[in-house]
Amino acid sequence: MGVELRYEMVKRGFYPFGAGKIIIDINKFNGLKPIVLPERGKIKSINVYTIYTNPDHASFHKNLVNNVKEKYGEYFKDELSEYIDKTYQKGKRAKHLASYIIVTSESGSIQKVESFWNIKESFKSGIAMEQILKALNEVIKNDKVSIDEHHADQLLVFMALANGESLITVKELSLHFQTMCYLLPIFLNDVKIDINKKEGDYYEVRVKGIEYKPE
């Protein structure tokens, strides 16, 4: 969208303890270009990332990577696992396993498939593996969807500020997404959001931006 930025992950945080820290440096820009992604397009790469606080879950990442390579080896590019061994607020230790599969296409579409367990949930390796691989398969076979539901609501803000009409396609309209569709016209009077359900069970989202220019 015409913005150059750099970021540094200083420290990871976990819900509900928080404690994460990211530094972002954004170059000065004159305005945002619209984002136009009417479909996913050809897959370029698949990356697998896992962050865990229980050393017993290290094997989950290895098994996940092996499964992804076996099913989608032609797209697999990279992997990263990180063990966080820290005590958080009031002497309590965060107990989490977070796995993310990032699917990137040649058109610039990026979709995330995630598996996340926290201290209040019971982690069962077999069920977790089945769920995340099923979700990945849904992304792979649906080339009409360009943005996943977890990122669509965040993109709406920038689409609303852009110079021109933006277009994305999504599988589901999350409650966060629907909330943003309600709030944005209240704060930005001239923004226009148009949502149409398409054949194939997905949504086309068009946003006419307000052509915001930073002072």
Image: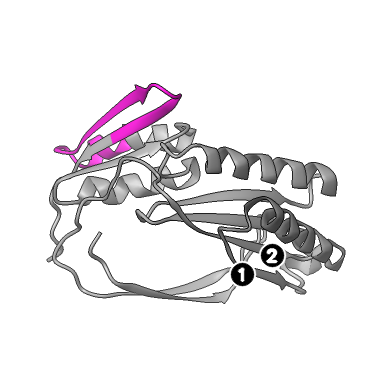
Closest to the observer, 186 or 117: 117
Q: Identify the residue at image location x=68%, y=63%.
A: 50
Q: Nearest the camera: 85 or 198?
A: 198
Please determine whether, in this image, residue 85 is positioned above or below residue 193.
below
Residue nearer the viewer, 37 or 52: 37
Q: Which residues are magenta?
A: 182-205
**Magenta includes 14?**
no
Q: Is residue 78 above or below residue 75?
A: below
**In the rendering, at what x and y percent does residue 12 appear?**
61, 69
Q: Is residue 183 magenta?
A: yes
Q: Quadrant of the N terminus?
A: bottom left
Query: Could you say which is closer to the camera, residue 146 or residue 51?
Result: 146
Q: Residue at x 49, y 45 (%)?
A: 150
Q: Position of residue 114 (x, y in %)?
A: 62, 50
Left or right: residue 44 compared with residue 107: right
Q: Which residue is mark 2?
A: 51
The residue mark sitting in front, 2 or 1, is 2
Q: Name the element at disc 1.
A: loop
Amino acid under label 1? Answer: Arg
Residue under the image location 32 percent in, 36 percent down: 183
Q: Mark 2: which amino acid?
A: Ile
> How many marks are shown on the rendered structure?
2
Query: Dot 1, how many residues are within 10 Å of its Cα: few (below 14), some (14-19), or many (20+)?
Result: few
Residue 138: x %, y % from top left = 58, 38
User: Which residue in the protein does label 1 denote?
Assistant: 12
Q: CA distance from mark 2 to mark 1?
A: 9 Å
Would you identify the image quadrant in which residue 132 lies?
A: top right
Q: Are marks 2 and 1 in contact (CB under 8 Å)?
A: yes
Q: Quadrant of the C terminus?
A: bottom left
Does the rendering let one see residue 191? Answer: yes
The residue at the point 63 percent across, 61 percent down is 48
Describe the element under mark 2 as helix, strand or loop: strand
